[in-house]
Amino acid sequence: MTAVRVDESGPAIDRGDVFLAVEPILVMRDLSVRFGALRAVEGVSFDVVPGSITSIIGPNGAGKSTLFNLISGALRPDNGRVHLAGHDVTGKSPNRLLAAGLARSFQITNLFFELSVFENLRLAAQRLEPGWRSLLPAKASRAALQRTEELIERFELGAGATDPAGSLSHGQQRRLEIAVAVATRPRLLLLDEPTQGMSHGDTVETSALISSLAGELTLLLIEHDVDLVMNLSDRVMVMHQGMKLAEGTPAEVRANADVQAAYFGEVDGA
Amino acid sequence: MAEAGAVAAAVAHNEKEGERTLNRLALAFVALGLIFAAVAASSGDVFFFRLASEALIFGGLALSVDLLLGFAGMLSLGQALFFGLGAYVSALVLKNLLPSFWLAMGITLAVATVAGMVAAVISIRARGVYFALITFGLAQVVAKVVYNVPRLGASDGIIGIPSIRIHLGLFDIDAASPAGFFLFCLGFMMLLYAACVYLMRSPAGRVLAAIRSNEDRVPFLGYPVGLAKVLAFVLAADVAALSGALYPMLRGFVSPELLYFEVSGNAVITAIIGGAGTLIGPLYGSVLIVGLRSVIGSYTSHHLIVIGSLFMLAVVFFPQGLIGFIARRREQRRLRRVAVVP
Amino acid sequence: MHGLLETLQFVYAPQVVNGLSIGVAVILMALGLTILFGLLDVINMAHGEFYALGAYLAVSLLAAGVDFWLCLLVVPLLMLPLGYVTERLLIQRVFNRKDRHVLTLLLTFGLGIVLEDAYRIVFGPNTVRVDSPISGAANVLGMYFPNYRLFVMGVGALIIALVWVVVFRTRLGAMVRAAAHDRQMASSLGVPVSRVYSGTFAFGVALAGLAGVLLAPIYSVFPTMGKDFILLAFTVVIVGGMGSIKGAVIAGLVLMQIQALASLYISPVWTEPLLFGVMVLVLMWRPQGLFGKLGNG
């Protein structure tokens, strides 16, 4: 399977006056899924450029999380294709997608609450070891342990690392949620409302963390906090009623009249 | 880096301490077995050797229940299916094919692996109590069939299984010798136990703990949940069947009762009273239960009422079981010591 | 043509009626199980033993000279407080723990063992027969069918209908369903949730007891009588969808017809694996069973 070339304008990152054409890491073509009569996602086509931070915004019920589920293998699309780094991955199971370099976090914290913070991370980092090592003693998994230590430090989870994940504060759990997804060293990371329910201070810190990740992987996020999105993202896609309403740089999206009407006009100050 | 390194070291230390406690309890189990053997042998006993061998064999069944319940969080109410399967296959091989220990074990292992895969395909999609009820039904149906198939001896089972010699390279063990077979069972069960411990402490084993904690998240960490559960199920089936394969060597017969729900239920009781998730707990539990039944049995035939009550008390007040309780007490004491010395 | 009719009349019809009769009996058992699961999330492994207790109480009362018809009323009433206390003392202790499904299953399993052994002590290990309160037989579709069986079918259907009405058409039922659906919400609306749970458990236990009395004259009474029945009842509940009354009724009727008709062609030994196979197929197709859960409907 050769890489999918994009027919229209081709994706690009605008870096001042240099205009680089790049092979997209994620390509969605005409994705649709229905739940009974509800068209949750309808004909969405979209590309994500490697190394970028791309955000999906839209009012509640716009189909953002459903789109995430389609990309991450949690749901199978009725129609359309998903390509990851040039390979067709439509309908592949989450574990195979992870092997292909795609990880995700969840909007509702989805951790191993009875296991320690350390163990949560190590379980994810274990994937970095070759498969045959999974039958050797866990303490021999040096790469996994090292990765776990690294993440504990980076996400500042050291204080409660031996405690069960369920005993952490909400903000810490949200951070661990991201860290667990990052631990697998994905090429593309999907973050579903990473700052959901966080205090202002935590949100600022998390936002800094996210932008620090941008150097090493591609980020696609769903976020409600519009200010955060506009500051953080290279590109923004706006969804409305299951469809793509607009896409472009934050400035372009902000100036788009449809977006103004459908989103900013509707949800005041969200 | 220093802080994070310290965390990893602390985690590793905690883990090592926890594992050491269980290792010591396992060694203590062997030591108790050897002391018992010395005392029983010096008094020329047969009865208690046989009883203790039986406790070990049923301990292996409880161990297989613990693999599923204590690690993957899957409650099997039909583990007797594989125990009975092992007993029947072993009996048939010894009686009709060749009275060879290794052949019986090899064929049992192969048959149990295939049967385990089939049963896993049927039951694995179901979760929680659904899984429990399907395994319950599966075992019940197979028991009914065995009970009614004349070629398997129907309700009588298979009798007249020849006594064998077990060739262990350097020396032989006569399965008919009470002391010899007891020691062999002890060694065999400890090998099974060690293999289970090794696997459950490996990264693959930890994935089972993750499945138990939050099954839906596991695929997003890159692990195929279905495959992991099938492997755990087959492993448990093999452990149960290999334990069951020793039964006809001890008793010289097998009967459909080995497949009944009483046996499955008893294994669950044993695993929980002994301490689910500890692996050595089920072996202690089996000794406790078999011993208790024998003691109560000398007064009355109603041992079930006592064991059932004990089990209910354990579920309500000691869900971590005997060994789980001891291990936790030691852990708390250790942490308190660490806290006192800064 | 004539031969076909005769085959239908003398070979199939009796099996259909027979299947219907067993079906109603199994549904009576399954009903209590499915209610306890649908409303309380409890897998009652001791259900068969409560059924046996109902039968034994009837045996004792009959021996004391109590009329059978009175037993039908008295035994369930006697079982109510027993169920209530069981829920208070056992189920409620583990109800707020994480693995409550598994823990309640284990607890009731332990209770079943204890009860079964207790019956051996109190009532003896032997099989007891209960005389049928209605004698004679009626001609049904050209074959003679015991009157009492016909009576049980009728009364069974009535009980099933009554239970449905209580759960779905009364204020009490609405309260119970509310408590099952959202404990906190129901509690804040003034539903005495804890007592409702105990009451519901008592109701399920009483239902098992009633089935015990009703079926005692048909099947014999012995300590493990519940155990032989419980797998069938669980199969029905799983196929119908745990917690669904409608599912239990439909699955009970269909499965027992399959069993009755299949027994014309295969040895009865194999009908149980057949039913189990049907259950597995249904589960592969619909893991939640045919119908949804009670609390949500």
Image: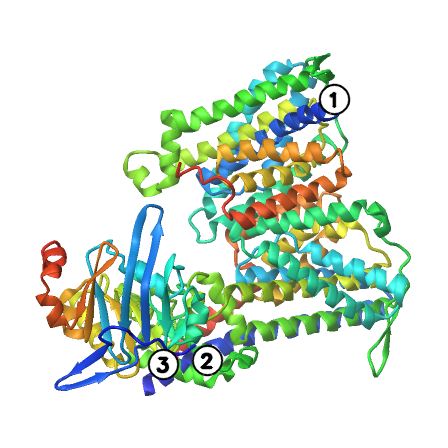
Q: For mark 1, does the 10 Å Cα neighbourhood hold few (<14), some (14 to 19), or many (20 or more) residues? A: few
Label 1: which secondary element: loop
Residue identified by numbered label 3? B342
Q: Picture coordinates of residue C14 (x, y %)?
A: 71, 23
The amino acid marked with disc number 3 is: Pro
Identify the disc placed on residue C1. 1
Pick whichever, B20 or B142, lies toward us.
Answer: B142
The answer to whether residue B2 is above or below residue C66 is below
Q: Picture coordinates of residue B74 (x, y %)?
A: 55, 57
Q: In which quadrant will I find the C terminus of chain C?
A: top left
The amino acid marked with disc number 2 is: Ala
The answer to whether residue B130 is above or below residue A4 is above
The answer to whether residue B228 is above or below residue A218 is above
**Are discs 2 and 3 less than 8 Å apart at CB?**
no
Residue identified by numbered label 2? B12
In the rendered view, does C77 fall on the left or right side of C95?
Answer: right
Q: In which quadrant will I find the N terminus of chain C?
A: top right
Question: Real-space Cα distance between discs 3 and 1?
Answer: 96 Å
Identify the disc placed on residue B195. none
Q: Residue at x 53, y 78 (%)?
A: A134
